[in-house]
Image (spheres, rainbow, N blue to C red):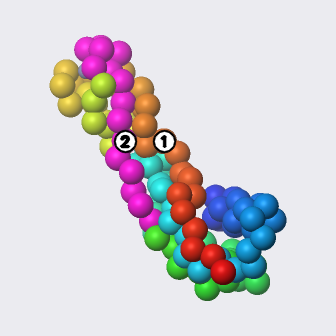
Amino acid sequence: MSLAEGVVQILEEYADKQGFARVKTVWLEIGRLSNVEVDSMRFCFEAVCRGTLAEGAQLEVIETPGRGYCLDCFQSVEHNARFDPCPLCSGYKVQATEGTEMRVKELEVE
Ligand SMILES: [Zn+2]
């Protein structure tokens, strides 16, 4: 729930700065390594938006791929689950470098 609340907080901050009153659509980037579950985010988002400037807003989720850096073979590799081994050497020392974040990419407002 708190992650969705964080998104609504971000929307309220933007609204203060940019002077819009309602949010119609939110494009949210969720990295594959961010530990954010897309389904539960959708569900929570709708719930926490009630009574806010984003009530009834549509949530468009863009899943961004993960990448990691393997400390065994020193390569940048595709990495879409935190505890997956390196696809090149099967080692487990892969450090996530991309796809670890969630951010608001774009808004449609009025
Ligand atoms: Zn490797």
Regarding ligand 1, which quadrant of the image does it lie in?
top left
Residue 110 image position (x, y, % from top left): 66, 81
* Residue denoted by label 2: 66
Using a 10 Å C-alpha cutoff, classify the residue at mark 2 as few (fewer than 14 neighbours), some (14 to 19) or many (20 or more): many
Mark 2 touching mark 1, by CB under 8 A? yes
Q: Is 74 a magenta residue?
A: yes
**Residue 97 in sight here:** yes
Q: Give whichever of 7, 84 is nearer the camera.
A: 7
Q: Is 30 a magenta residue?
A: no
Q: Give whichever of 13, 8 is nearer the camera.
A: 13
At horizontal 37% and vertical 41% (from top left) the residue drawn is 66
Disc nearer the start of the sequence (2/1): 2
Label 2 and label 1: CA atoms lie apart by 7 Å
Quarter of the rendering containing residue 71: top left
At horizontal 65% and vertical 62% (from top left) the residue drawn is 7
The amino acid marked with disc number 1 is Thr
Q: In the rendered view of the protein, which quadrant contains the N terminus?
A: bottom right
**For numbered disc 1, what is the local secondary structure?**
loop
* Residue denoted by label 1: 100
**Magenta span:** 61-75
The amino acid marked with disc number 2 is Gly
At horizontal 43% and vertical 43% (from top left) the residue drawn is 99
